[in-house]
Image: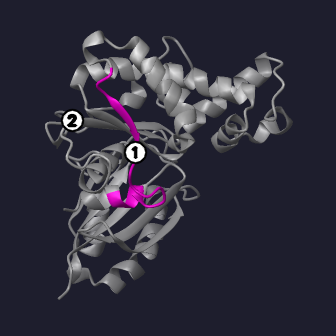
Amino acid sequence: MTQALALGIDIGGTGTSFGIVNRRGEILSKGSMPTIGHKTPQDYFIALEYALRPLIEKAGRQNINGVGVGAPNGNFFTGEIVFAPNLPWKGVIPIVRMISETFGLKATLTNDANAAAIGEMMYGAAKGMKDFIVVTLGTGVGSGFVANGQVIYGHDGFAGELGHVIAVRDGRKCGCGRHGCLEAYTSATGVVRTAHEWLEQRNDDTILRANKENITAKMIHEAAAAGDIFALAVFDYTAKILGQVLADTVAITSPEAIIFFGGLAQAGELLLGPVHKYMEENMLNIYQNKVSLLRSALPDADAAILGASALAW
């Protein structure tokens, strides 16, 4: 007997991953390709089609229930990626229409963080939860809000953009064009910006100074884990801003948990420990000590694929 399958596609700021997934959340085959390096959305889609076709043919098109796509600024209602600041192209990309027409499969799109939230609810840390928030800390900061067991989309499909609430008034310029967004401080990119700014302004003795032109968030994490005082201070500054914003966010949906997903979340307690401290310090007392901070329970390399594929069910 053939099993029902879904194709999950996660379009990230630098790379795209995809896989064929069954209902139990097992990835039967998968692959990846760069998101960057394609001049137009059409060029990107040609490359994506070339990469996906072998997986679809191997699984059997007739066995695939549908395609789920997670992408920055992906709109569930329109099926379009709209002005995504962390993708290489500007404007509107009708990704659902392109996939449906090319492969003859029903496709569903949402933003990458909403896809992560659906994946956590079906397969991960949010199993059994009806009220939670997923925060993705990657190239940007994304979020997916679930209340009463439903993803909150809002009237236009763009609800829950935590990365673009103003965390620092008149602060850094964000990729979206505004100033002071949470993303400009607490994404992997934002953490690197903090390190660069501080290395220019201060004289701290840090192992990061020797290679300051090529610093990555992973390097900052490794330095912090090794006890580098400067790197730990960068994390503490990042955690304070994130914790303060989360304290305000809790007051809106009163979630049972906030689940962290994405590259920067791999820092674990080095980051989430101080985030929890600053969140509790800034939270209205009726919410204190009620909200768990959790890391995604989905396998790191596969979480994005699982989240996207869950849309197809």
Q: In this view, does 32 lie to the left or right of 303?
A: right
Most foreground residue, 184 or 290: 290
Q: Distance between the residues labelled 1 and 2?
A: 22 Å
Task: Please indicate, yes or no, whether residue 177 appears anywhere in the rendered image.
Answer: no
Q: In the depicted view, which residue is nearer to us: 145 or 267? A: 267
Residue annotated with mark 1: 72
Name the element at disc 1. Answer: loop
The magenta-colored residue range is 289-306
Number of the label disc, if any, that sits on residue 146? none
161 relative position to 226: left or right: left
Give residue 20's position: percent from left, percent from top.
34, 72
Quarter of the figure with the C terminus: bottom left
First in sequence: mark 1 or mark 2?
Answer: 1
Quadrant that contains the N terminus: bottom left
Q: Where is residue 42 in the image (x, y as percent from the top left)?
A: 44, 61
- Nearest the camera: 89 or 238? 238
